[in-house]
Image (tube, helix red, strand yellow):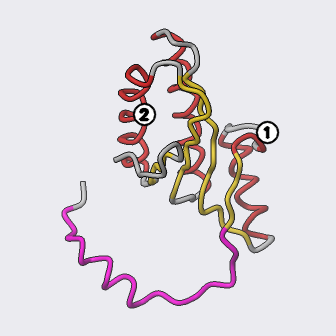
Amino acid sequence: MSTTQSDGIEATLRGCRPAEIDPIVVDAADLESTAPEHLRDLKAEFSARGYQPATLSVAARFDGGDTLATQREADRLREFVRAASFLGAGRIEIRLDEVADRDAAEPALSALAERARREGVELVRVDDGSAAA
């Protein structure tokens, strides 16, 4: 765990300079796989073409209404958190398309946000536009 103060970013930013690279949003539905080999090749191809994934956008559906379905969806989303981290994206955008029971989905989303934080990825929920932290 880092003990760096938040003002440490200022020192890092002072040494930054612009890069000749375009940030992009990758739609999770367009990924053929979240396997590390595929993501490694995809990341290399993005870089070769001058792109850097900034955000991975994924649609979430907590429409099952039962605990098992909620867990399956949370597991699927966790794979995309890992994929975002592997691609070097700083953010994963979760679009809540369908939620059968918001009270059941909230703990799963909170755990997902914590997992994203540990992976170095900011989780942003699009249902209300706020970051889930």
CA distance separating discs 1 and 2? 24 Å
Mark 2: secondary structure: helix
Q: Nearer the viewer, residue 9 or 124?
A: 124
Q: Residue at x 67, y 38 (%)?
A: 34
Label drawn at residue 32: 1
Q: Mark 1 or mark 2: which comes first in sequence? A: 1
Residue 94 is inside the magenta segment: no
Q: Is residue 65 above or below residue 92?
A: above
User: Circle 2: is it few (<14), some (14-19), or many (20+) Cα within 10 Å?
Assistant: many
Closer to viewer: mark 1 or mark 2: 2
Give the x, y percent position of residue 85.
53, 51
Q: Residue at x 65, y 61 (%)?
A: 53
Q: Is residue 67 above or below residue 96?
A: above
Residue extent of the magenta highlight: 3-23
What amino acid does circle 1 point to? Glu
Residue 6 is inside the magenta segment: yes
Label drawn at residue 109: 2
What amino acid does circle 2 point to? Leu
Mark 1: secondary structure: loop
